[in-house]
Amino acid sequence: MSKSFDDLLAKVSQCSRKTVSVAVAQDAPILEAVKAAKEKGIADAILVGDEAKIREVADQIGMDLTGYEIVNEPDDIEASLKAVKLVHDHKADMYMKGLLSTKDFLKSVLNKEVGLRNGKPLSHVCVFEIPGIDRLLYLTDVAFMTYPSLEEKKSIIENSVEVAHACGIPCPKVAPLAAVEVVNPKMPVTVEAAELTKMNENGEITGCIVDGPLSMDLAIEPEAAIHKGATDRKIVGDADILLFPDIHAGNLVYKTLVHTTQCKNGCIITGTDAPVILTSRSDTFEVKLNSIALAAVVAESLKANK
C-alpha cells in the first residue's frame, strides 16, 4: 500500500518502463518534468510538436534531447491527434497535455478514431499526501464533472477505485461527502450518498467499501467519530477516497489544500483506455512529476488486468 509519493515512486520502479506521449511538447515546465521522469526511471517520453521550438526550449533549460523521440508537427491540433494516436496504438502508455488548451486536449482524448474513450464517463482523480494523515487521500471529482448524477457518481467511484487498487489498496474506503452525516430528504446530496452505500452493499459497486453520507471530519478524523458517537460506521475517520457532491465543493477543498498546506499531489483523468495527465500551467514541477508517476502505476495496473 502506497502511503506517500515516495512509496508510489518505489512502486514505479517495480513496473516495466513506461512511455508518455506529450502533445505540443514545446513547454519548459512540461519538458522539465519529462526530463526528471526519465532521470528517475519513471518513464521515457515521445515529444510531439514543433521540433524547432522543442529544441529551443530544451536548450534554454539545459535539457539534452538525446534518447528522446521527437515527432515534428507544428500544428497544435494535428500534434495532439498524433500524440494521442501513439497511445491509442499502444506505442506509448500515457497521454500528457503540453502547451495546448484544455479544450483541444480533451477533444483529442475523445476523438472517435484515435482517442482513448472506452464507453465510461471520464472523471478526475487527485491523489494527496497531506502532513498529519497517515495515508494517501484520493479526491474526486475536483476538476472535470460539474454536477454528477447518481449514475455518474457510481462511475466516479469505480474510476477512483481502479486508481486506488493500482496504488496498492485492495479494498479502499469511499466516503460520499456531505455537510452532515445523516440522510435529510431536503438535502439531495445525502439521499444520493445513502443510495451509493446501498449499491455497494447490493454488489452494484464492488472492490471497495462505501459509507455515506459522511461529513468531512468523520471521513478523515477518527477522534471526530468518537466525539460524535459514530464509531459504529463502516468508515471511522479512515476513508481513502473522498467523493465530492459537485465540482465546487471538490475544487474549493483542492485549492485550499494546495495553497495552505505543505502537501504533495498528482492528478490524472480516468475512465479512459490509458491514463491521461492533465495538469494546469500553474501546477508546480513536482505536481507534474507526481502525476507522471501516478499515471505510470495506473498504466501498469491496466496492462496487468487486460
Image: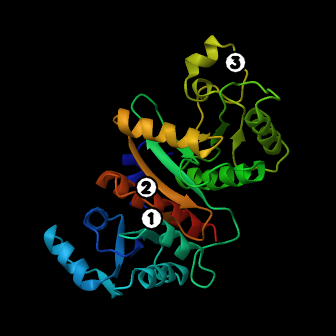
Which residue is at a point 31% across and 51% down the rendered structure image? 284
- Image position of 61 with respect to 234: above or below: below
Under tag 2, what secondary structure? helix
Q: Toward the viewer: 24 or 275?
A: 24
Q: Toward the viewer: 141 or 37?
A: 141
- Whole-number angstrom distance, CA of label 1 to CA of label 2: 7 Å
Residue type, label 1: Cys
Residue type, label 2: Lys
| Residue 226 x, y percent position in the rendering | 62, 14
Residue 32 is left or right of residue 243, and the answer is left
Do labels 1 and 2 touch, CB within 8 Å? yes
Depth check, mark 3 against mark 2: the one in front is: 3
Q: Which residue is mark 1?
A: 15
Under tag 3, what secondary structure? loop
* Visible residue check, residue 123: yes
Residue 22 is left or right of residue 197, and the answer is left
